[in-house]
Each structure stands twice: as structure tokens, then as C-alpha cells.
Amino acid sequence: MYAILQISKIKDENLVYADNDSAGRIRWANEYDDFVSKAPVVVKESIIKFNNSSNHKEKFDAKKRILSCGMYAIPFIREETKKGNIEIIGIMPEILEAPAQCLEYNNSYWLKWLSDNESIINDFIIGK
């Protein structure tokens, strides 16, 4: 659960960490805002590709793009599970950077986790 609050886990965007100068902080904030604005589109497109592809490489690439959005993918994964797409929930342990033993948890566990943490998802990730 701690990973939900860690904004520093944005990997693929190669954010420049803020230096001690204000220009570095402004640059980091601008890059972060740019990432956050693109994440929903990236996740939605990647989930569609993940769902519709029978090609292993395409599915892997879509999963990689979803994972690159970190915690911002969680609300979209939740929506997909509500539509009945349970396969996508297998990404949850990697998004949350869960301990190795969590990789063995089944889909029911992650569906319950999404339900139990809905207020956290809404408050901290979506900003509702």
C-alpha cells in the first residue's frame, strides 16, 4: 500500500529529480504534470491492447506501458475488473511493488483489495 503514495516511482518518463535550485524544482514539477496528464490515455490505450491482443509480445508491451504509469493505472484496472476483465488484475502486485509472497495471491484477493481501498484510490490517485 505504501507504493500508492510514492510519486517517485514514475519510471518511464525519466523525470529529472529536483535539484536544490528553483529551476530544477520547476522543471521536475512541469515534467510530473506532463506525465500525469498523459497517464490516463496511455493506460486506457494499453489496456485495450492488452485485452485484445493474442500476440504475446504485444500483450507484454501493453503490460509494460501500463506498469510505467504506476499507481495511475490502478483506477483504470479497477474499472476493467468491474466490466468483467479479470485477467488485467494480474498486474496489481507489480504496480504496488508488493513483496514476493503477494505474487501468489489470487484474483479474488486483488478484487477485494481494490474494493477495500476504493477511498484511497479516489482520494490519492484520482483526486476526487
Image (cartoon, rainbow, N blue to C red):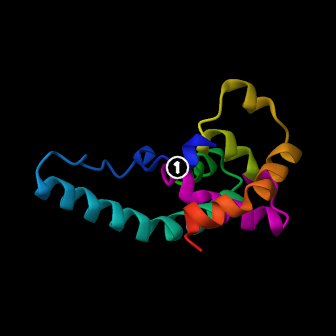
Tell which of 61 and 21 is nearer to you.
21
On screen, residue 8 above or below 43: above
Residue most extreme to the bottom? 128
83 vs 97, left or right, is right
Q: Residue at x 25, y 56 (%)?
A: 28
Residue 52 visible in the picture: no
The C terminus sits in image quarter: bottom right
Total residue callouts: 1
Asked whether 83 falls inside the magenta stretch, the response is: yes
- Residue 22: image location, x then y, percent: 13, 57
Q: Residue at x 85, y 64 (%)?
A: 84
Q: Residue at x 65, y 61 (%)?
A: 121
Tell which of 102 and 80 is nearer to you.
102
Residue most extreme to the top? 101
Amino acid type at image mark 1: Leu
- Residue 125: image location, x then y, percent: 56, 62
Magenta: main secondary structure: helix
On screen, residue 32 above or below 18: below
Q: Quadrant of residue 101?
A: top right
Residue wearing tag 1: 5
The N terminus sits in image quarter: top right
Residue 66 visible in the picture: yes
- Residue 80: image location, x then y, percent: 75, 65
- Residue 96: image location, x then y, percent: 61, 42
Secondary element at image label 1: helix
Asked whether 87 falls inside the magenta stretch, the response is: yes
Count neighbours of disc 1 (C-alpha within 10 A) and say few if under 14, some if 14 to 19, many if 20 or more: few
The segment highlighted magenta reads: 67-88
